[in-house]
Image: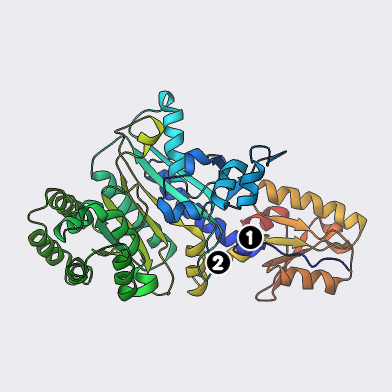
Amino acid sequence: MAQKPSIPKGTRDFNSIEMARRNYIFDTIKDNFKLFGYKQIETPAMENLSTLMGKYGEEGDKLLFKIQNSGDFLKNCTDEELLGRNAVKLTNKMCEKGLRYDLTVPFARFVVQHRNDLSLPFKRFQIQPVWRADRPQKGRYREFYQCDADVVGSDSLLNEVELLSLIDRVFKNLGIRVTVKLNNRKILQGIAESIGEGDKIIDITVAIDKIDKIGLENVNKELAEKGLSEDAISALRPILELTGSNEEKLAVMKCILKDSEVGLKGIEEMSEVINTIDCLGHECDMEIDISLARGLNYYTGTIIEVKAKDVEIGSITGGGRYDNLTGVFGMPGLSGVGISFGADRIYDVMTQLDLFPKSLEQSVKVMFVNFGEREAAKSLKYVAALREAGVPATLYPDSAKLKKQMTSAAADKIPYVAFVGETELDKDAIMIKNMETGEQKTYTLEEAINLLS
């Protein structure tokens, strides 16, 4: 019995309509990337594990897909190591490469490797798939696309403002109502210092990054397990639950962090970003969220996360400032800031809200019916002329029954069907039927081009 075909959990097939919709998202994002002056690059699907490991924190390292060495992948493993069944140790011996977890770390590697060819500041974008060994669930996949835009080589906060304007424009074009949440890693560092746990900033950010998933009470339990005192956890709670306008939140935090130099620096940066983007104007809501942490360890300043207003789903865009990511690759001190659009989640949001243009379902504008050899030969000439004029056109490949051909046109949502029979051959004409209204009329080729263009 033949094995039933399947695909790995957390991955998906996409049919032609789905691909048309996905490309609509990609094209919208790409057009805006170019509008804002970003240049496209690509990096390999796999990187050396030495490039990837240690860049995403302990949680992220666990989610890396590791690629088994080709050939005798056990040659570096002793019998003792094999019998010991230490998965981590064996993996390190058997795997030298891994699938990329995101596009930011490969980009940092790219910048360092090609530093002599780049003019700084360098603005780049990438639209490529990434892989994470996560538990598949609604809106969370093991293979998904990211659409990244980054600027490296500039400390200016105008870069953050530009990225926020880019986010606002993209979601305006896509028709999605969103809230852009903002925080600053320096504020989080200041909070950790203010509650007497400055050395546990990573434990704190990893934990509070899960608030939306597991709730505040479970976050507090995790913080206790990480060694935070009850007094520290109690002091942290009202900060994470802070409400009010952006100005009110900043004013409160300024008082709380009055003795933290790094915390006050974060508030200063946040104020500048918020005030500047407000002056430029924006349609989406910009909201300071002190609980926003984004657990990735490489963020050092502004943190950005975007949530859809009308659909319950995780973040659909995220990013932030990283001041020394390239340092681990031998190029210290190079500042960068970037964002990543989650195309797959954006797709799910637009599907649920029925935001895709109906025209995306039409791959062909007109289909010529095939009545036989002579008629098909003439129709092919018309098809070629229409394509030359930029009109998507096709000829049904077989001289099947008319009903079958018309059913095919309807199934493919083709808006016009063209007929070239004996009468049309004699008159050098084309009869065209509007599939929506049922109206039929005879046209010359020039008239047909004008109708269908």
Name the kind of residue labelled 1 in the image.
Leu
- Marks 2 and 1, how far apart at CA: 48 Å
At a point 15% along the width and 53% down the height, the residue shown is 263
- Picture quarter with the N terminus: bottom right
Q: Is residue 97 visible?
A: yes
**Which mark is on residue 451?**
1
* Above or below, comparing residue 110 to residue 396 in the picture: above
At a point 64% along the width and 59% down the height, the residue shown is 452
307 left or right of 388?
left
- Considering every residue shown, the one lying at the far top of the view is 116
In the rendered picture of this protein, how many numbered marks are placed on residues?
2
- Considering every residue shown, the one lying at the far right of the view is 373
Q: Nearer the viewer, residue 123 or 64?
A: 64
Name the kind of residue labelled 2 in the image.
Pro
Q: Nearer the viewer, residue 388 or 160?
A: 160
Q: What residue would you read off at disc 2?
A: 136
For label 2, count other residues whose C-alpha is less than 10 Å away and answer few (under 14), some (14-19) or many (20+): some
For label 1, count other residues whose C-alpha is less than 10 Å away and answer few (under 14), some (14-19) or many (20+): few
**Which mark is on residue 222?**
none
Q: Quadrant of residue 246?
A: bottom left
